[in-house]
Amino acid sequence: MKTITLNTKDHISNIFIGEKFENFRDYVDPERVIIVTDKNVFKLYKDRFEGLKTIVIGTGEDIKSFKTVEYIIEKLIELKADRNTFLLGVGGGVVTDIAGFVASIYLRGIEFGFVSTTLLSQVDASVGGKNGVNFSGLKNIVGVFSQPKFVFCDISMLKTLPEREIRSGLAEIIKHGVIGDPEILEQLDKEYEKIKSLDQKFLEKIIYNSVSVKSKIVSIDERESGQRKILNFGHTIGHAIELTEDLTHGEAIGIGMVVALGISIEKCYIDPNVFIQIEKLLKKYGLPTELPKDIDKVMKVISFDKKNEKDGLNFILIKGLREPVIEKMDLDEIAKLIKKK
Ligand SMILES: NC(=O)c1ccc[n+]([C@@H]2O[C@H](COP(=O)([O-])OP(=O)(O)OC[C@H]3O[C@@H](n4cnc5c(N)ncnc54)[C@H](O)[C@@H]3O)[C@@H](O)[C@H]2O)c1
Ligand SMILES: [Zn+2]
């Protein structure tokens, strides 16, 4: 097991990589715990929930809504949850985002933690303290910054995760490699078989390296007033593609990164070899790299998504590996550069 301590201004959060779900009893009195999980995880790991107070929610992005927040709060009241209650989110990013949000508003905030069960939530969603829900067609438009007491990345639970979801997480790991630690890219390129066979030791190492990149950035800029924006590399376009196409978050972000790297070449920021290296790596892991044919549709979604950013979008470009830059760009310029490709 490896540990990362994330220090923010007024909080310390420990991330235990390789710790197992059932060991949560060593970190918090089980009498205090109420679990929030989704129905897939509950069904797959039924025996581990035995005897524990558990609230089960549905699956999919649509579940990350106020309706589900109300449902969880109703159940918490039924279960007589009080200020001493510890809410434990067990699942992927949908569960951790919503469980962290409910814990932050129930009785003005109770303690919470996560057992992260997808690769994407282990390297990204459960780390960093952003918790929230979607509303009115806008992703993560309502939420809070609040840090969990602890996060377990239970690598053994990845065995039941569909391959497509593993790929989705790999895209975020590649993102962390590009913006903060090129060694991650080399390891992924070299150890394809270890990823395919879900080699526990290797996963522990790569998840540790990936979380290290994110937690360093978050500890400098928890509230995304500056530096944290670089974590959105690939996400401006990726989010829009996620909404217009039938793709997972990571698949869409993979395409978003390729587009951002393409624009970085157009603006003479990077050596085309960096673009080739990343595109090759994404393809190696079966991630799509081609933009959807209807670019105008994607651009329309971006303008809806970012309608509150009045003086241009903060677009993340790359000057080299480990050298991301935040650039103000307007939609027309982005569209022009994409179409030029
Ligand atoms: N808060 C943040 O900083 C942040 C960062 C990135 C993403 N996110 C959010 O995370 C969400 C996506 O997270 P995700 O990719 O984990 O999706 P998810 O939570 O929807 O999980 C994907 C699927 O895998 C299933 N699953 C979970 N664990 C499993 C396991 N061990 N075995 C088998 N199946 C399992 C789930 O039931 C679901 O069907 C999005 O809502 C996104 O906005 C948040
Ligand atoms: Zn993401």
Image (cartoon, helix red, strand yellow):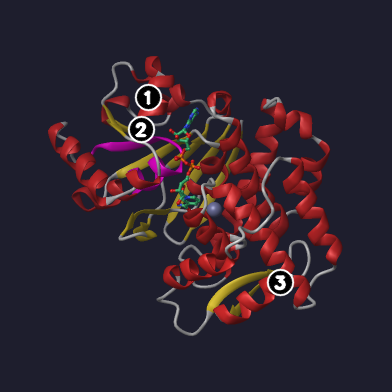
Residue under numbered circle 2: 37
Residue 316 vs residue 238, the one in the foreground: 238
| Left or right, residue 142 beside residue 325 | left
Q: Position of residue 212 (x, y in %)?
A: 63, 49
Give me the residue at 76% from left, 75% from top: 266
Type of the residue with mark 1? Phe
Q: Circle 3 — which element?
A: helix
Which dot marks residue 31? none
Quadrant assignment for the C terminus: bottom right
For mark 3, does the 10 Å Cα neighbourhood hold few (<14), some (14 to 19), or many (20 or more) residues? many
- Sequence-wise first label, 1 or 2: 2
Query: Against 296, is 234 above or below?
Result: above
Q: Cβ–Cβ below 8 Å for labels 1 and 2?
A: yes
Magenta segment boundaries in residue numbering = 83-100
| Residue, far front | 293
Element under disc 1? helix
* Residue occupied by mark 1: 42
| The CB of the residue at mark 2 lies under 8 Å from ligand 1 | no
Question: Alpha-carbon distance for marks 2 and 3?
Answer: 40 Å
